[in-house]
Image (cartoon, rainbow, N blue to C red):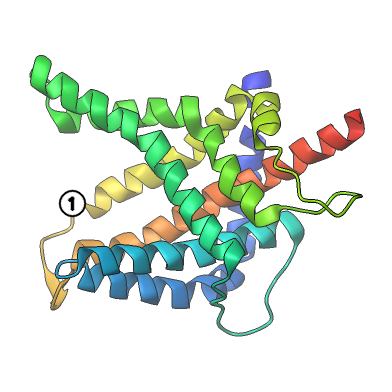
Amino acid sequence: MGLFRYCRLAFRSLLILIEQFPVFFRLSWLCMAISLLGAAVSSRHLMAGGVTDLLARGVFVVAWLRMVGLGEIPSSRHYFRLGRRETFGALSWMAAEIFISFPAQVISASLAIAAGVPLADSVMVLSGATHLLLGGFYLVPADAALERAGPSGNLGWRVPDLMIRGGLALGVAVFVCWLPLNLLQEGVKMLPEMELVDGLALRDAVMVPVRYLGMALTAGTLALAWNRLMAEETADE
């Protein structure tokens, strides 16, 4: 049961997403619009489009982490605050995605070259395995968004200790979040090739809200796990 102790948090995160969907839409619609703009310009200006999308996702994921973890709900009808916390949250979320997905890509490419295994046949299985084994790395952006000052007023970076305490159970919870959204993304890839506007295809446009739903589900789960781990650490002191 220890390996599955955070899976309940994944289902709780899903319930929060369903119950707070108006808040999700209010926090994400402007960020999604900016991500769509980044996707539209990335065909011509890859770096500019990528950075734009990254920062937009960072703004949203920090806001959602703080909403789930700390109960902070901005009162404005739209939300886009780009500060130090959001920038570091965006970079750490990107680092977590790369750290988790890169091994699967490398191993899949190696199998394709060495054994002739089709890349599409192995990358999903290996990606699931890396999310299962390395998913706890998403605690880094969670800690960036939810950092709190201790009694001395100093901010301490406790992610390594929290990851050790959470263990593989964190990866199991992340895998539970990753699986349905990954299947949904595979369904999006089956959409017909159609260009909506210059530089923006139908698949890319539909993929943006799907990714934001995935970020909300995963970030919510890690926010709940971070709170539990911090509470356990405080109880042990």
Measuring from the top left, give residue 14's x and y in whole percent. 58, 50
For image coordinates 87% across by 37% down, the residue present is 234
Circle 1 sits in a helix, a strand or a loop, which is it?
Answer: loop
On screen, residue 136 versus residue 164, left or right, reads left
> Given the image, on which type of amino acid does mark 1 rest?
Met
Residue of label 1: 190
* Residue 5, visible in the rendered structure: no
Measured along the vertical axis of the image, is residue 82 above or below residue 1?
Answer: below
Measuring from the top left, give residue 182's x and y in whole percent. 36, 43
Q: How crowded is mark 1: few (under 14 residues within 10 Å), some or many (20 or more)?
A: few
Measuring from the top left, give residue 77's x and y in whole percent. 59, 85
Q: Nearer the viewer, residue 83 or 43?
A: 83
For image coordinates 65% across by 31% down, the residue present is 160
On screen, residue 7 versus residue 91, left or right, reads right
* Residue 67, visible in the rendered structure: yes
Q: Nearer the viewer, residue 224 or 235?
A: 235
Q: In which quarter of the image is the C terminus?
A: top right
Q: Quadrant of the N terminus?
A: top right
On screen, residue 146 versus residue 36, left or right, reads right
Measured along the vertical axis of the image, is residue 116 above or below residue 6?
Answer: above
Farthest residue in the top direction? Answer: 115
Q: Nearer the viewer, residue 227 or 155?
A: 155
Quarter-of-image position of residue 57: bottom left
Measured along the vertical axis of the image, is residue 124 above or below residue 199?
Answer: above
Measuring from the top left, give residue 189's x and y in whole percent. 21, 52
Measured along the vertical axis of the image, is residue 234 above or below residue 167?
Answer: below
For image coordinates 26% across by 32% down, the residue present is 105
For image coordinates 57% across by 75% down, the residue present is 81
